[in-house]
Image (cartoon, rainbow, N blue to C red):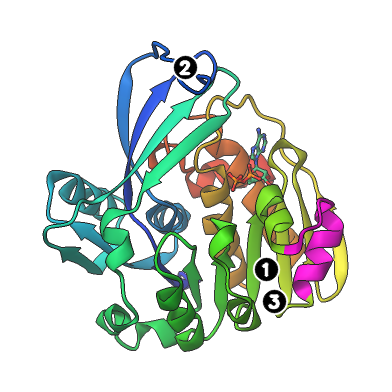
Amino acid sequence: MTPPRLTVVGSLNLDLIVRVARFPRPGETLLGADFITAPGGKGANQAVAAARLGAEVRMVGRVGDDPFGGRLLMALDEAEVDRSAVLTTSGVATGVAMITVAADGENQIVVATGANAALTPADLTAAGSRLGSADLVISQLEVPSATVAAAAREAGRFLLNAAPADRVEPTLLEVTDVLVVNRGEAQALTGDGDPARAARRLTELGPTLVVVTLGPEGSVVVADGTLTAVAAFPVQAVDTTAAGDAFVGALAVALAEGNDPVAAVRWASAAGALATTVVGAQPSLPTRTAVEELAGT
Ligand code: ADP
């Protein structure tokens, strides 16, 4: 089988990570464990996730002309993601995410967007005709929404991971084929705290496939009007950072390979579960062999 061709239009951040016993209260100073840095950013994570699962992936984004940017480009090279459309903005910092991970694996994240905010619709031409010819174009909302909207319009088939959800414009959902959101994002978009009802409402706004992920409780899928609950794979979670990104990358690969939506979500759930068993974003993204083993495919 020829590998699916995916293009990711999105963010690249360096993650600055400290593990803590619990989260600090406002005004409180806590002592944490060792400081770790790891390549991250929802866009780059999803690109690396898909590449690790065998897809041919092109990344479109921006970094700053600082050492962090160089480190992120190297990470894409190591993952064999085509980064010829990742541009460098001078005089602006590369995006960073300050992450604390608590003992139960839960995380809190503050992102300083930096160069990601400089990605314009015009930058998409750096990706040439590849946007239209990719099997699937994937975006999140850590880059300007006008750029995401332009990518969606150029794409043949478009997957939106609407995170963070406060930046979704309704017209974007009209040109979205596949929508992936977590529980909080589904509620923010619909005002409905019930994931199944929220998923159904979201399909009325444009996407033909909507997935609401629910962490260790799995996910709900609405495909062609039919709702299915997909269970999570039980694992020992140590860090949930990038579980959603592993899930989205794997879902994109499985859909582009022609799998039916529910089977694709099940496969993606195995990738999401595996990502929680290793600390860090990109270091935790699983290989195809590991996903196939857990999913039993
Ligand atoms: P996000 O990281 O975007 O908030 P979720 O936490 O919902 O996304 O995780 C995405 C998917 O990853 C879930 O639907 C589930 O299949 C899998 N997953 C996440 N956390 C766990 C966990 N603790 N155990 C097993 N699977 C998990």
Inspect this view and state whether residue 253 appears.
no
Q: Amino acid at mark 1?
A: Asn
Q: Which element type, helix, strand or loop, lies under badge 3?
A: loop
Name the quadrant containing residue 236.
top right
What's drawn in magenta, residue-wise? 190-203
Q: Amino acid at mark 3?
A: Pro
Given contact means CB atoms under 8 Å apart, are the residues at marks 1 and 2 in contact?
no
Marks 1 and 3, how far apart at CA? 17 Å
Disc 2 residue lies near ligand 1 with CB under 8 A: no
Q: Which element type, helix, strand or loop, lies under badge 1?
A: loop
Left or right of 215, for residue 93:
left
- Check the image and report above or below for 171 versus 117: below
257 or 244: nearer the eye? Answer: 244
Q: Amino acid at mark 2?
A: Val
Q: Which residue is mark 1?
A: 259
Disc 3 residue lies near ligand 1 with CB under 8 A: no
Q: Which residue is mark 3?
A: 207
Q: Quick check: is 183 in the magenta stretch?
A: no
Looking at the rendering, the quadrant in which ligand 1 lies is: top right
Dominant secondary structure of the residues highlighted in magenta in the image: helix
Left or right of 265, for residue 138:
left
Left or right of 118, for residue 218:
right
Name the quadrant containing residue 119.
bottom left
